[in-house]
Amino acid sequence: MAARNGRRRHVDKVEKPSGTNIAEYPIMSDKPVILVTRKLPQAVEDRLRSDYEARLNPDDHLYTSDELIERAQGADALLPCHTEHLSAEIIGRLPDSIKAVANFSVGFDHVDLEAAKARGIIVTNTPDVLSDATAELTIMLMLGAARRASEGEHLVRSQEWRDWSPSFMVGIQMTGKRLGIIGFGRVGQVTAKRARGFDMEIHYTDVRRLPREQEAGAIYHDSPEDLLPHCDFLALHCVATPETRNLLNAERIALLPDDAIVVNAARGAIIDDEALIAALKSGKLAAAGIDAYNNEPDIHPGYRELVNTFLMPHIGSATRETRDAMGFRAIDNLDAIFAGREPRDRVV
Ligand code: 8YV
């Protein structure tokens, strides 16, 4: 069997044709070929290069669908980010050699799981390791929105700051307020823990109530409708699924107390943009802090036009420590898969 494109090719099962002397039968590379779609931290790429035949993306450009399919030829697995939309159509075009998609992300809404499952492709994610970084960013969104950080920063940088008065740039205090969390998983629980440092009273809703020790005093509500009236601040931490699409819509926003603050470091799909922008414009909501949007990076222009939005460019997990940990976690999953073990973070 010749190596494709002159590359040594990993084969996980060498079938010996009858009559062939095993000594003459070519065993190709013992290193699986991994297509890495974006530039990853140096330490992660070093480990990939040493343990795999890594096809890297040194200039970090976004692959077109055709380029992705072309570069995947002969590869054994993909290591993509959420920027690669692995739709059913793309998954259908992947070569048969692809056994796994080891995501560099905890979210997997960019992958059509049914299509992957149908082709027998294993999909993994990187939970746990980004909870601290994302919770930190959530607290920053809350503070930034409540204390009018965008407006203040703009005033100073643009040299438009001329004066000071007791009524200048007055915002909302976070200390002692009620924080409602939709989605009390790993990130939601760390956000709650950090918010307790601000003496906040934690309320949450999730598909089911957590054991008391995990609640750590948080008050459970069995639906968003029941939770929302108790939220001075609302943080979205649920997974983006067809069920949570537009979860925060006009009807639910109306259930929030007037002057509430909404933050989202999860996924844009959870919010109905038109409804949130209307509530920020009308003064129903005091402010919003957002890190994840529909149709990134081409977000709804309404957010940019408002002064009461504090906007970040999807950087929830963007710390040195976390990005290394995400990469290592994705490689741990690949290591398990190619050693014939069950990967720790299998999604399908
Ligand atoms: C990542 C994220 O930076 O992990 C996730 O789901 O949203 C981000 O924190 C991104 O997805 C990397 O692919």
Image (cartoon, rainbow, N blue to C red):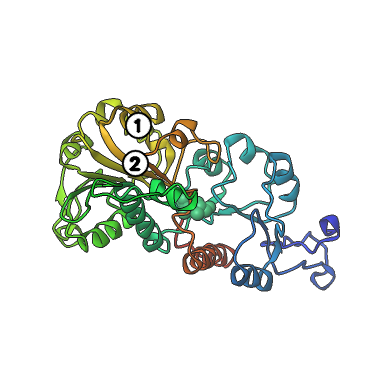
Where residue 200 sits, quadrant-wise, is bottom left
Point 61% across, 62% down: residue: 40
Asked if the residue at tag 2 contacts the one at tag 1, i.e. Cβ–Cβ closer than 8 Å, the answer is: yes
Answer yes or no: disc 2 within 8 Å of ligand 1: no
Please state the horizontal and vertical placement of residue 71, each as a whole percent of the image: 74, 50
Q: Is residue 96 left or right of residue 310?
A: right
Secondary structure category for the residue under label 2 = strand
Picture coordinates of residue 112, whole percent (x, y): 52, 39
Q: Residue visible at 24% across and 57% down?
A: 192
Q: CA distance from mark 1 to mark 2?
A: 9 Å
Indicate left or right for 145 with 202 as reference: right
Residue at image mark 2:
288
| Closer to the camera in the image, 340 or 327 | 327
For badge 1, the amino acid type reads Leu
Give how far across and how far down residue 147 sits, in percent.
Answer: 30, 50
Specify whether residue 332 is in view: yes
Residue 53 in which image quadrant: bottom right
Classify 19 as above or below 141.
below
**Can you identify the residue that label 1 sits on?**
276
Give me the residue at 77% from left, 68% from top: 27
Residue 105 in view in this figure: no
